[in-house]
Amino acid sequence: MHPNLPKFIPRVCYEIFVRSFCDSNGDGIGDLNGIISKLDYLADLGIEAIWLTPINPSPSYHKYDPVDHFEIEPEFGTMADFKRLLSEAHKRNIVVYLDLIVNHTSTYHPWFTESSKGPDNPFRHFYWWLSPEKIEELGIAERQTSDDSDEVYPWHEIPGDNEKYYGLFWKGMPDLNYDSDLLRKELAKIITFWLEEIGIDGFRLDAARHIYPIWEKEKNRGFWEFFDDVVRKAKPDAYTVAEVWAETWEVAPYLENLNATFHFDLSFALQRIVIQEKDENLVQQLLASYSQFEAFNPEFIDAIMLTNHDQDRIGSVVGNHKGKIKLAATLLLTLPGQPYIYYGEEIGMLGTKPDPYIREPFLWSENESDSMKTNWLNAEFSTLRTIEPLSSQMKDADSIYSHYKKLIELRKTVKALGQILKPNIEEVESFDNTIMAYVRTHETEPVLIIHNLSSEVKNIRLPDSRAGFQDLIFSTNKSSITQGGELELTAYGSLILKERPTTISGINWSPVV
Ligand SMILES: [Ca+2]
Ligand SMILES: [Ca+2]
C-alpha cells in the first residue's frame, strides 16, 4: 500500500531557514512572528506551502539536533506564536510543513542523558551502544563519507562507559535506535501531537535513508511503513516529503511509504547544465526516473529544487550571472513535479559552504539598518554590495524576483505546467545540445518550452511536428517568434509557446507577455 494523497497538493513550495528569514523583535535572530509578517509577501509571490527548518528547542544555530520534540525553540518564539503562524498561513491558502528529525537527537536530549547513564537504564536502547569488540567484529568502526556526512568514525566515547554510541553525523548527534518499541511509541506521540493536536499539514523528513545504519539497512523500509501508519492514523491526508540524499535508484523505494522525495540527481543535473551550457539528455533521464518512482508509488510526487540549505546556492554555482540565474529558474519552474524554492533564491542570493554562508540573512530592503533583516551572522556573500535587495527588485520588471513571480504565476495558471502527478513531459529532439526543448503534454492545452543554454543568439525553426506551437506566452531577454515561425533565442533566453487555435497565419496572435 502506498500512502494517501494529501487533499491539497501545493504547486509551488518555499523553504525557510528560520534563523535567517525575518526578525520581528530586534534581537537579530529570525523568528516565527517575522515569518507571519512575511506571509503576505509569500502569498503574493504565489507560494502555496512553506517548509520551516526545525523549530524545536536545540543547542545549535540550525536546530537539526532537537532536545525536546514538543516545544518551540525560545529564540524563535512560543507555541502561541506558532499556532498563530499556522492559522495566518491557512487564511492565505498556504500549508505548513515542519522539519521532523527522527534519525537522531542532540546529546543534550533527556533521552540521551538517561541512556548514557549505563547499560541498565531504561532509555539505553533508544540509541545504538556497542562494545569496541563488537564494533570490530562487525567491521563497522569506519564508514565511507557520503554527500550528507563527512564522518569517518561514527562511534563515540563517553568517559567511564565501556560501550560506544553511534552518531553518523557527529558526536553531538547520537542516532536513535528504532528496534526499541518504547522509542517507537514516543515517536508516535510526537507525530500525533503535531498533526492532530497542533494541526500542521505535513512533515519534511530529515536523513530518511539513515534511520537504520548501514549494517541493518534492510530494516529501513519497515520503519517507514510504521511511520506512514502512524501519520495516516493521526491525519489521513497529511503530506510527507523525505530527504533521501542519494541516486534515484536508491531514492525510489522510499516512495512506497512517503508522498514525495527530493530529487537530488535532478538538482545536480540542472546545475551542471547551466554551468556547462549544454544539455545532457535531461528529459530522457527524467523519464527514466519517473518509471523508477512509479514502480513504488503510482501517485508519487517529485519534489524538485535547484538547491536547499545543504547545498551551495544556485546564484554562486552559476557565478552570479543574472542570465544564468534566470535560466536555472526557468528550467526548474517549467519541469514537472513540485518545486521547492530556497528562501532568497528569488532575489538571486549567493553563498558557498561552510554551511552558515549558504544560510545568510534575507535582504529585504536597501536600508542598511533594516530591522527585519537578521544579523546573527555577518554575511560574506549576500550583501547590499553584491545583491539587489527585494525592495528594489520588486520595482524592476527585469529583476530575478519579477522573473520568479511571472514563472510561478504561469505554473499556477497553465494547466500543463502545474501538473504534479503523473509527470507530463515529452522530449523535442534538437540537433544542437545547447538548445533544450520539451513539451509539457496536456489533452487540450500542451505547451512547448525551449531554452537557449548558450551565450550566443540562436535562430531556429521548429520541427514540422511541433509547428503548431506559435503563440508566445512567456519569453526571457526578448527572445521571440517571427510571423514566419522562426524563433530567436537570446543568450540564456527561454520561450514558452502554446498551440495556436487555428493555423491560418496572421490571425489570433496573442499579445507578447
Ligand atoms: Ca528575533
Ligand atoms: Ca540512523
Image (cartoon, grey):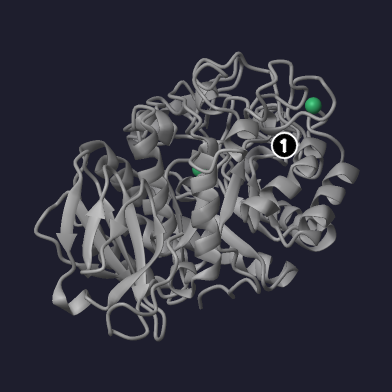
Residue positioned most to the right: 80
Find disc 1 in the rendering and name its residue.
111
Q: Can residue 280 be seen in this view?
A: no
Residue 250 in which image quadrant = bottom left
Q: Residue at the spot x=65%, y=38% of the render?
A: 124
x, y percentage for residue 12?
56, 58
x, y percentage for residue 65?
64, 33
How many numbered marks appear?
Answer: 1
Q: Residue at the spot x=67%, y=27% of the render?
A: 365
Q: Which of 475 and 55 is in front in this view?
A: 475
Disc 1 element: helix
Look at the picture and state if 370 lies above or below 317. above
Q: In this view, does 457 lie to the left or right of 222?
A: left
Q: Nearer the viewer, residue 336 or 237?
A: 336
x, y percentage for residue 392?
61, 31
Residue positioned most to the front: 506
Q: Which of 37 and 296 is in front in this view?
A: 37
Q: Which of 325 and 210 is in front in this view?
A: 325
x, y percentage for residue 158?
59, 19
Q: Is residue 2 visible?
A: yes
Residue 19 in which image quadrant = top right
